[in-house]
Image (tube, rainbow, N blue to C red):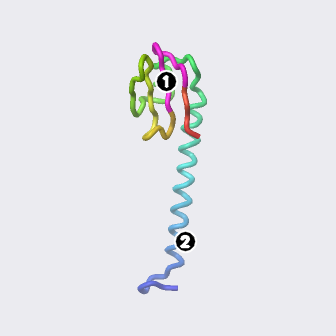
Amino acid sequence: MELLGIPIVPIIIIIWILLSNYTEEQKKEKEKISKKWDNITTGMSETEVIGKLGQPHRIWRAGAAEIWVYGSSDSNGQIRFLDGKIIAYERSS
């Protein structure tokens, strides 16, 4: 099969390979993020969290608590701090 003199089958195969490589990279990135979050526990300090997860994407205050968001649009998770210690955290699956 050809489209404008260009064989379509090899193009489809190349696109298929590129997409499968992209999804594998996405899986590896998610696993890496998940392993980092496995080390987060309630009661950890802000400096310990920065050491394990790095700087948050966004920080905001909710009353006396401070909420750190990792990833764009909470894609990786949120951590809630009160007096510099984790009181709750939620990671995306």
Q: Which mark is residue 43?
A: none
Dot 2 surroundings within 10 Å: few (below 14), some, or many (20 or more)? few
Task: Report the amino acid beneath label 2.
Answer: Ile
Residue at 54%, 78% in the rendered image: 9
Looking at the picture, does residue 17 appear above or below residue 32? Answer: below
Q: Position of residue 2 (x, y in %)?
A: 48, 85
Q: Label the magenta part by its dominant secondary structure.
A: strand
Of residues 11 and 34, the one drawn nearer to the viewer in this rendering:
34
Please identify the residue farthest to the front as the structure is shown.
Answer: 63
Q: Which residue is mark 1?
A: 80
Which picture quadrant has residue 42? Answer: top right
Task: Report the amino acid beneath label 1.
Answer: Arg
Residue at 43%, 86% in the rendered image: 5
User: Residues in magenta?
Assistant: 78-88
Residue at 45%, 84% in the rendered image: 3
Q: For marks 2 and 1, give the CA distance.
A: 46 Å
Looking at the picture, does residue 66 appear above or below residue 15? Answer: above
The reply to whether the magenta stretch includes residue 84 is: yes
Q: Position of residue 56 (x, y in %)?
A: 42, 30
Badge 2 marks a residue whose secondary structure is: helix
The reply to whether the magenta stretch includes residue 68 is: no
Residue at 40%, 34% in the rendered image: 57
